[in-house]
Image (cartoon, rainbow, N blue to C red):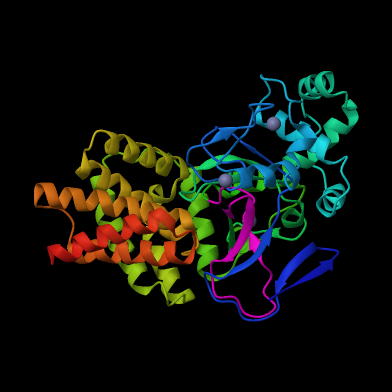
Protein backbone atom coordinates (compact mmCIF):
# COMPACT_ATOMS: atom_id res chain seq x y z
CA UNK A 1 0.00 0.00 0.00
CA UNK A 2 2.95 2.32 0.80
CA UNK A 3 6.48 2.80 -0.42
CA UNK A 4 9.43 4.67 1.05
CA UNK A 5 11.20 7.36 -0.93
CA UNK A 6 14.22 9.51 -0.31
CA UNK A 7 15.08 12.87 -1.84
CA UNK A 8 17.29 15.83 -1.05
CA UNK A 9 14.35 18.21 -0.47
CA UNK A 10 12.08 15.90 1.51
CA UNK A 11 14.51 13.46 3.13
CA UNK A 12 12.66 10.22 3.85
CA UNK A 13 9.04 10.21 2.85
CA UNK A 14 6.21 7.71 2.53
CA UNK A 15 4.07 7.57 -0.59
CA UNK A 16 0.83 5.75 -1.41
CA UNK A 17 1.62 3.06 -3.98
CA UNK A 18 -2.09 2.59 -4.80
CA UNK A 19 -5.40 4.40 -4.21
CA UNK A 20 -6.22 4.53 -0.52
CA UNK A 21 -9.70 5.21 0.79
CA UNK A 22 -10.35 7.75 3.55
CA UNK A 23 -10.46 5.98 6.93
CA UNK A 24 -8.02 3.19 5.99
CA UNK A 25 -5.34 2.27 8.57
CA UNK A 26 -2.19 2.38 6.49
CA UNK A 27 0.67 1.63 8.88
CA UNK A 28 1.44 0.68 12.46
CA UNK A 29 4.59 1.49 14.46
CA UNK A 30 6.05 0.07 17.68
CA UNK A 31 7.36 2.39 20.39
CA UNK A 32 10.95 2.39 21.54
CA UNK A 33 9.75 3.83 24.84
CA UNK A 34 6.64 5.43 26.32
CA UNK A 35 5.83 7.36 29.50
CA UNK A 36 2.26 7.64 30.79
CA UNK A 37 1.48 10.76 32.83
CA UNK A 38 -1.04 9.31 35.26
CA UNK A 39 -1.52 5.81 36.61
CA UNK A 40 -4.96 5.13 35.13
CA UNK A 41 -3.84 3.18 32.07
CA UNK A 42 -2.22 -0.22 31.69
CA UNK A 43 1.34 0.43 30.50
CA UNK A 44 1.07 -2.23 27.81
CA UNK A 45 -2.46 -2.11 26.36
CA UNK A 46 -3.38 1.40 27.62
CA UNK A 47 -6.77 0.17 28.81
CA UNK A 48 -8.39 1.88 31.81
CA UNK A 49 -9.35 -0.85 34.27
CA UNK A 50 -8.23 -2.32 37.60
CA UNK A 51 -4.44 -2.26 37.55
CA UNK A 52 -1.63 -3.89 39.51
CA UNK A 53 1.63 -2.05 40.02
CA UNK A 54 5.03 -3.56 39.24
CA UNK A 55 5.96 -5.19 42.57
CA UNK A 56 9.57 -4.07 42.34
CA UNK A 57 9.42 -0.38 41.31
CA UNK A 58 5.71 0.47 41.89
CA UNK A 59 6.19 2.99 39.06
CA UNK A 60 4.09 1.40 36.35
CA UNK A 61 0.95 -0.69 36.31
CA UNK A 62 -0.58 -3.49 34.26
CA UNK A 63 -4.07 -4.91 33.78
CA UNK A 64 -3.02 -8.56 33.54
CA UNK A 65 -0.16 -11.02 33.89
CA UNK A 66 0.16 -11.20 30.11
CA UNK A 67 0.46 -7.38 29.81
CA UNK A 68 3.05 -7.46 32.58
CA UNK A 69 5.10 -10.12 30.74
CA UNK A 70 4.92 -8.13 27.50
CA UNK A 71 5.96 -4.99 29.36
CA UNK A 72 8.90 -6.67 31.07
CA UNK A 73 10.44 -8.17 27.92
CA UNK A 74 9.04 -6.49 24.76
CA UNK A 75 8.76 -3.00 26.24
CA UNK A 76 12.09 -3.42 28.05
CA UNK A 77 10.76 -2.54 31.50
CA UNK A 78 13.44 -4.88 32.91
CA UNK A 79 16.05 -2.41 31.60
CA UNK A 80 14.92 0.50 33.77
CA UNK A 81 12.77 -1.04 36.54
CA UNK A 82 13.66 0.57 39.90
CA UNK A 83 16.06 3.08 38.34
CA UNK A 84 13.88 6.24 38.32
CA UNK A 85 13.85 9.08 40.85
CA UNK A 86 10.46 9.96 42.37
CA UNK A 87 10.63 13.64 41.42
CA UNK A 88 11.44 13.31 37.71
CA UNK A 89 9.14 14.95 35.18
CA UNK A 90 7.65 12.92 32.31
CA UNK A 91 10.34 14.29 29.97
CA UNK A 92 13.09 13.26 32.35
CA UNK A 93 11.61 9.78 32.70
CA UNK A 94 11.38 9.40 28.93
CA UNK A 95 14.99 10.42 28.43
CA UNK A 96 16.30 8.21 31.23
CA UNK A 97 14.33 5.20 29.94
CA UNK A 98 15.74 5.88 26.48
CA UNK A 99 19.20 5.75 27.96
CA UNK A 100 18.66 2.27 29.37
CA UNK A 101 16.90 0.97 26.29
CA UNK A 102 19.53 2.29 23.87
CA UNK A 103 22.00 -0.11 25.49
CA UNK A 104 19.97 -3.08 24.21
CA UNK A 105 20.62 -3.82 20.50
CA UNK A 106 17.51 -3.66 18.29
CA UNK A 107 16.01 -2.27 15.08
CA UNK A 108 14.15 0.64 16.65
CA UNK A 109 17.31 1.57 18.58
CA UNK A 110 19.26 1.71 15.30
CA UNK A 111 16.58 3.86 13.65
CA UNK A 112 16.57 6.19 16.68
CA UNK A 113 20.36 6.61 16.30
CA UNK A 114 19.77 7.94 12.78
CA UNK A 115 17.04 10.47 13.67
CA UNK A 116 17.78 14.18 13.47
CA UNK A 117 18.18 16.29 16.59
CA UNK A 118 16.42 19.54 17.31
CA UNK A 119 18.64 22.61 16.84
CA UNK A 120 17.39 23.91 20.14
CA UNK A 121 20.51 23.61 22.31
CA UNK A 122 18.73 25.13 25.26
CA UNK A 123 17.88 21.75 26.73
CA UNK A 124 18.36 22.57 30.35
CA UNK A 125 21.56 21.51 32.06
CA UNK A 126 19.40 20.71 35.04
CA UNK A 127 17.75 17.81 33.19
CA UNK A 128 21.14 16.43 32.21
CA UNK A 129 22.51 16.97 35.73
CA UNK A 130 19.58 15.30 37.42
CA UNK A 131 19.52 12.29 35.11
CA UNK A 132 23.31 11.90 35.15
CA UNK A 133 23.42 12.02 38.96
CA UNK A 134 20.97 9.15 39.27
CA UNK A 135 21.96 7.02 36.25
CA UNK A 136 25.64 7.65 35.61
CA UNK A 137 24.98 8.34 31.88
CA UNK A 138 27.27 10.92 30.30
CA UNK A 139 25.73 14.39 30.25
CA UNK A 140 26.58 14.84 26.55
CA UNK A 141 24.63 11.65 25.73
CA UNK A 142 21.67 12.77 27.80
CA UNK A 143 21.57 16.12 26.02
CA UNK A 144 21.69 14.35 22.64
CA UNK A 145 18.76 12.07 23.60
CA UNK A 146 16.86 15.10 24.91
CA UNK A 147 17.32 17.01 21.61
CA UNK A 148 16.28 13.96 19.57
CA UNK A 149 13.36 13.46 21.87
CA UNK A 150 12.22 17.08 21.46
CA UNK A 151 12.08 16.61 17.72
CA UNK A 152 10.75 13.08 17.53
CA UNK A 153 8.46 12.22 20.43
CA UNK A 154 4.71 11.83 19.95
CA UNK A 155 1.96 12.80 22.37
CA UNK A 156 0.05 9.65 23.26
CA UNK A 157 -3.74 10.11 23.10
CA UNK A 158 -6.49 7.93 24.52
CA UNK A 159 -9.56 6.93 22.51
CA UNK A 160 -11.21 10.29 23.32
CA UNK A 161 -8.12 12.09 21.98
CA UNK A 162 -7.02 13.25 25.44
CA UNK A 163 -3.28 13.45 26.11
CA UNK A 164 -2.10 10.64 28.39
CA UNK A 165 1.64 10.47 27.82
CA UNK A 166 4.64 10.67 25.53
CA UNK A 167 6.27 8.11 23.30
CA UNK A 168 9.20 7.69 20.93
CA UNK A 169 8.29 5.81 17.73
CA UNK A 170 11.50 5.90 15.65
CA UNK A 171 10.10 4.25 12.51
CA UNK A 172 7.17 6.71 12.46
CA UNK A 173 9.46 9.72 13.05
CA UNK A 174 11.74 8.62 10.24
CA UNK A 175 9.06 8.23 7.59
CA UNK A 176 6.37 10.93 7.57
CA UNK A 177 6.71 14.57 6.65
CA UNK A 178 4.61 17.38 8.03
CA UNK A 179 1.74 19.37 6.56
CA UNK A 180 -0.52 21.96 8.25
CA UNK A 181 -3.23 20.45 5.99
CA UNK A 182 -2.45 16.75 6.60
CA UNK A 183 -3.96 13.84 4.67
CA UNK A 184 -3.31 11.37 7.51
CA UNK A 185 -3.53 11.27 11.30
CA UNK A 186 -1.93 9.14 13.95
CA UNK A 187 -3.72 7.54 16.86
CA UNK A 188 -3.01 4.67 19.21
CA UNK A 189 -4.02 1.02 19.40
CA UNK A 190 -2.59 -0.19 22.68
CA UNK A 191 1.00 1.06 22.65
CA UNK A 192 1.24 1.00 18.85
CA UNK A 193 0.98 4.16 16.80
CA UNK A 194 -1.39 3.73 13.85
CA UNK A 195 -1.46 5.96 10.74
CA UNK A 196 -4.85 6.46 9.10
CA UNK A 197 -5.77 8.24 5.86
CA UNK A 198 -8.26 11.09 6.42
CA UNK A 199 -8.81 11.75 2.72
CA UNK A 200 -9.11 9.52 -0.35
CA UNK A 201 -5.54 9.33 -1.61
CA UNK A 202 -4.50 8.93 -5.24
CA UNK A 203 -1.52 6.68 -6.03
CA UNK A 204 1.83 8.52 -5.54
CA UNK A 205 0.41 10.96 -2.96
CA UNK A 206 2.85 11.62 -0.15
CA UNK A 207 1.48 10.68 3.31
CA UNK A 208 1.65 13.76 5.54
CA UNK A 209 0.82 14.08 9.22
CA UNK A 210 0.74 17.21 11.41
CA UNK A 211 3.64 17.73 13.83
CA UNK A 212 1.73 20.43 15.73
CA UNK A 213 -1.71 21.82 16.55
CA UNK A 214 -2.87 22.97 13.09
CA UNK A 215 -5.53 25.26 14.57
CA UNK A 216 -2.76 27.70 15.49
CA UNK A 217 -1.99 30.79 13.34
CA UNK A 218 0.40 30.43 10.42
CA UNK A 219 3.17 32.52 11.95
CA UNK A 220 3.12 30.53 15.16
CA UNK A 221 3.22 27.25 13.22
CA UNK A 222 6.08 28.39 11.02
CA UNK A 223 8.17 29.66 13.92
CA UNK A 224 7.73 26.39 15.82
CA UNK A 225 8.55 24.24 12.78
CA UNK A 226 11.65 26.29 12.09
CA UNK A 227 12.84 26.21 15.71
CA UNK A 228 12.22 22.56 16.43
CA UNK A 229 12.45 20.92 12.99
CA UNK A 230 14.59 23.43 11.07
CA UNK A 231 12.40 23.77 7.97
CA UNK A 232 10.26 26.43 6.31
CA UNK A 233 6.75 25.06 5.86
CA UNK A 234 5.50 25.29 2.29
CA UNK A 235 2.44 23.07 2.73
CA UNK A 236 -0.95 23.67 1.09
CA UNK A 237 -2.24 25.63 4.09
CA UNK A 238 0.85 27.88 4.28
CA UNK A 239 1.54 28.43 0.56
CA UNK A 240 -1.49 26.91 -1.19
CA UNK A 241 -3.54 27.95 -4.22
CA UNK A 242 -7.24 28.49 -4.87
CA UNK A 243 -9.49 28.61 -1.83
CA UNK A 244 -6.65 27.50 0.45
CA UNK A 245 -4.81 30.69 -0.43
CA UNK A 246 -7.98 32.69 0.31
CA UNK A 247 -8.31 30.95 3.66
CA UNK A 248 -4.65 31.65 4.49
CA UNK A 249 -5.12 35.35 3.69
CA UNK A 250 -8.33 35.54 5.72
CA UNK A 251 -6.59 33.97 8.72
CA UNK A 252 -3.58 36.29 8.42
CA UNK A 253 -5.90 39.34 8.35
CA UNK A 254 -7.95 37.96 11.25
CA UNK A 255 -4.91 37.24 13.43
CA UNK A 256 -3.40 40.68 12.78
CA UNK A 257 -6.58 42.43 13.98
CA UNK A 258 -8.25 43.05 17.28
CA UNK A 259 -9.43 39.77 18.71
CA UNK A 260 -12.40 41.19 20.60
CA UNK A 261 -15.54 39.65 19.33
CA UNK A 262 -18.06 41.94 21.10
CA UNK A 263 -21.67 40.86 21.01
CA UNK A 264 -21.46 37.36 19.57
CA UNK A 265 -25.09 37.40 18.41
CA UNK A 266 -23.89 39.63 15.56
CA UNK A 267 -21.84 36.79 14.13
CA UNK A 268 -24.09 33.83 14.70
CA UNK A 269 -26.34 34.12 11.66
CA UNK A 270 -23.39 34.00 9.30
CA UNK A 271 -21.70 31.17 11.22
CA UNK A 272 -24.90 29.10 11.19
CA UNK A 273 -25.48 29.64 7.47
CA UNK A 274 -21.91 28.78 6.69
CA UNK A 275 -21.93 25.58 8.77
CA UNK A 276 -25.08 24.46 6.99
CA UNK A 277 -23.64 25.30 3.60
CA UNK A 278 -20.27 23.66 4.10
CA UNK A 279 -21.78 20.47 5.57
CA UNK A 280 -24.23 20.20 2.69
CA UNK A 281 -21.49 20.60 0.08
CA UNK A 282 -18.48 19.03 1.75
CA UNK A 283 -18.20 16.13 -0.71
CA UNK A 284 -17.72 18.67 -3.49
CA UNK A 285 -14.35 20.29 -2.76
CA UNK A 286 -14.41 22.86 -5.56
CA UNK A 287 -12.14 25.89 -5.58
CA UNK A 288 -14.89 28.17 -6.92
CA UNK A 289 -17.44 27.21 -4.35
CA UNK A 290 -15.07 27.28 -1.39
CA UNK A 291 -13.50 30.58 -2.53
CA UNK A 292 -16.95 32.19 -2.49
CA UNK A 293 -17.61 30.65 0.90
CA UNK A 294 -14.34 32.05 2.32
CA UNK A 295 -15.01 35.43 0.70
CA UNK A 296 -18.18 35.83 2.77
CA UNK A 297 -16.03 36.19 5.86
CA UNK A 298 -13.86 39.03 4.57
CA UNK A 299 -16.09 41.59 6.31
CA UNK A 300 -16.00 39.66 9.63
CA UNK A 301 -12.46 38.30 9.92
CA UNK A 302 -12.92 38.13 13.73
CA UNK A 303 -14.56 34.73 13.19
CA UNK A 304 -11.16 33.44 12.05
CA UNK A 305 -9.07 35.06 14.76
CA UNK A 306 -7.37 32.22 16.64
CA UNK A 307 -7.42 33.96 20.04
CA UNK A 308 -11.12 34.85 19.68
CA UNK A 309 -11.90 31.22 18.88
CA UNK A 310 -9.86 30.03 21.85
CA UNK A 311 -11.89 32.34 24.09
CA UNK A 312 -15.08 30.95 22.53
CA UNK A 313 -13.88 27.37 23.29
CA UNK A 314 -13.27 28.34 26.90
CA UNK A 315 -16.69 29.99 27.11
CA UNK A 316 -18.20 26.80 25.61
CA UNK A 317 -16.53 24.67 28.31
CA UNK A 318 -17.62 27.06 31.10
CA UNK A 319 -21.21 27.06 29.83
CA UNK A 320 -21.16 23.24 29.80
CA UNK A 321 -20.12 23.23 33.43
CA UNK A 322 -22.95 25.62 34.30
CA UNK A 323 -25.33 23.59 32.12
CA UNK A 324 -26.20 26.79 30.28
CA UNK A 325 -27.11 25.07 26.99
CA UNK A 326 -28.24 28.16 25.00
CA UNK A 327 -24.98 29.94 25.78
CA UNK A 328 -22.89 26.83 25.07
CA UNK A 329 -24.69 26.46 21.72
CA UNK A 330 -23.80 30.01 20.66
CA UNK A 331 -20.11 29.73 21.48
CA UNK A 332 -19.97 26.19 20.15
CA UNK A 333 -21.33 27.22 16.75
CA UNK A 334 -18.61 29.86 16.37
CA UNK A 335 -15.95 27.25 17.20
CA UNK A 336 -17.44 24.63 14.87
CA UNK A 337 -17.57 27.15 12.01
CA UNK A 338 -13.85 27.84 12.48
CA UNK A 339 -12.92 24.12 12.67
CA UNK A 340 -14.95 23.20 9.59
CA UNK A 341 -13.01 25.76 7.57
CA UNK A 342 -9.47 25.56 8.94
CA UNK A 343 -9.17 21.78 9.54
CA UNK A 344 -9.50 18.99 6.95
CA UNK A 345 -13.00 17.42 7.16
CA UNK A 346 -11.53 14.10 8.31
CA UNK A 347 -9.55 15.64 11.18
CA UNK A 348 -10.85 14.08 14.44
CA UNK A 349 -10.88 17.32 16.46
CA UNK A 350 -13.80 18.56 14.33
CA UNK A 351 -15.79 15.32 14.63
CA UNK A 352 -15.30 15.17 18.40
CA UNK A 353 -16.36 18.80 18.79
CA UNK A 354 -19.37 18.42 16.48
CA UNK A 355 -20.51 15.41 18.55
CA UNK A 356 -20.24 17.38 21.82
CA UNK A 357 -22.02 20.38 20.36
CA UNK A 358 -24.92 18.28 19.12
CA UNK A 359 -25.45 16.79 22.57
CA UNK A 360 -25.59 20.37 23.92
CA UNK A 361 -28.04 21.52 21.24
CA UNK A 362 -30.17 18.46 21.91
CA UNK A 363 -30.31 19.32 25.63
CA UNK A 364 -31.35 22.90 24.84
CA UNK A 365 -34.05 21.78 22.46
CA UNK A 366 -35.24 18.99 24.77
CA UNK A 367 -35.45 21.07 27.96
CA UNK A 368 -36.63 24.44 26.64
CA UNK A 369 -38.65 23.06 23.73
CA UNK A 370 -36.94 25.69 21.60
CA UNK A 371 -33.59 26.01 19.93
CA UNK A 372 -31.98 24.94 16.71
CA UNK A 373 -33.76 23.28 13.78
CA UNK A 374 -33.74 19.53 14.00
CA UNK A 375 -32.57 19.24 10.39
CA UNK A 376 -29.61 21.54 11.15
CA UNK A 377 -28.73 19.49 14.23
CA UNK A 378 -29.00 16.26 12.23
CA UNK A 379 -26.62 17.57 9.61
CA UNK A 380 -24.02 18.23 12.32
CA UNK A 381 -24.54 14.80 13.95
CA UNK A 382 -24.23 13.08 10.58
CA UNK A 383 -20.96 14.87 9.99
CA UNK A 384 -19.70 13.88 13.46
CA UNK A 385 -20.66 10.27 12.80
CA UNK A 386 -18.92 10.20 9.39
CA UNK A 387 -15.77 11.80 10.86
CA UNK A 388 -15.58 9.48 13.89
CA UNK A 389 -16.31 6.36 11.81
CA UNK A 390 -13.38 7.26 9.57
CA UNK A 391 -11.05 8.16 12.42
CA UNK A 392 -11.07 7.05 16.04
CA UNK A 393 -14.49 5.38 16.51
CA UNK A 394 -14.90 3.94 20.02
CA UNK A 395 -17.03 5.36 22.80
CA UNK A 396 -17.28 8.81 21.19
CA UNK A 397 -18.98 7.26 18.18
CA UNK A 398 -21.42 5.44 20.51
CA UNK A 399 -22.30 8.80 22.12
CA UNK A 400 -23.01 10.36 18.73
CA UNK A 401 -25.25 7.41 17.79
CA UNK A 402 -27.27 8.02 20.98
CA UNK A 403 -27.80 11.69 20.07
CA UNK A 404 -28.87 10.63 16.57
CA UNK A 405 -31.45 8.22 18.00
CA UNK A 406 -32.84 10.93 20.28
CA UNK A 407 -33.07 13.37 17.38
CA UNK A 408 -34.94 10.79 15.33
CA UNK A 409 -37.52 10.59 18.13
CA UNK A 410 -38.10 14.35 17.89
CA UNK A 411 -39.06 14.18 14.20
ZN1 LIG B 1 -3.10 -4.32 29.67
ZN1 LIG C 1 9.15 -2.13 37.72
ZN1 LIG D 1 2.35 24.62 6.75
Examine the structure image and report whether residue 196 is included in the region drawn in magenta.
yes
Across and down, in percent, residue 177 comes to: 71, 59
Residue numbers of the magenta segment? 188-214
Q: What main secondary structure does the magenta stretch of the protein show?
A: loop
Task: Locate residue 207: give its quadrant.
Answer: bottom right
Taking 309 as reference, is 26 above or below it? below
Across and down, in percent, residue 206 comes to: 69, 70
Residue drawn at 78 percent across, 56 percent down: 174
Position of residue 79 in the picture relative to residue 21 (left or right) = right
Quadrant field for ligand 3:
bottom right
Taking 352 as reference, is 183 above or below it? below
Residue drawn at 27 percent across, 58 percent down: 402
Residue drawn at 54 percent across, 41 percent down: 163
Is residue 234 something that shows in the picture?
no
Is residue 166 something that shows in the picture?
yes
Q: Nearer the viewer, residue 321 or 288?
A: 321
Across and down, in percent, residue 120 comes to: 78, 36
Quadrant where the C terminus sits is bottom left
Examine the structure image and report whether residue 193 is included in the region drawn in magenta.
yes
Amino acid sequence: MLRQENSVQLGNSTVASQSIECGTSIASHKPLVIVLSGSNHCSTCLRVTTLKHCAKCKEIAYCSISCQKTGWIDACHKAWCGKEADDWTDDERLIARLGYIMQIPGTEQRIFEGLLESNDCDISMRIADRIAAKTGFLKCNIRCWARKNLRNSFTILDDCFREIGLGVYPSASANYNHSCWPNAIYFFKGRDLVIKAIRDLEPNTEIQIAYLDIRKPEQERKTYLKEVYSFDCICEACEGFGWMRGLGELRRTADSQDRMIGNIDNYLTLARLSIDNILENRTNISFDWLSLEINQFSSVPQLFNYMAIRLCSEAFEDSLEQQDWPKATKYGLLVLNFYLHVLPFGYPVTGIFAGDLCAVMFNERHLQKTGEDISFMKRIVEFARWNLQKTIGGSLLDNVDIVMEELDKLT
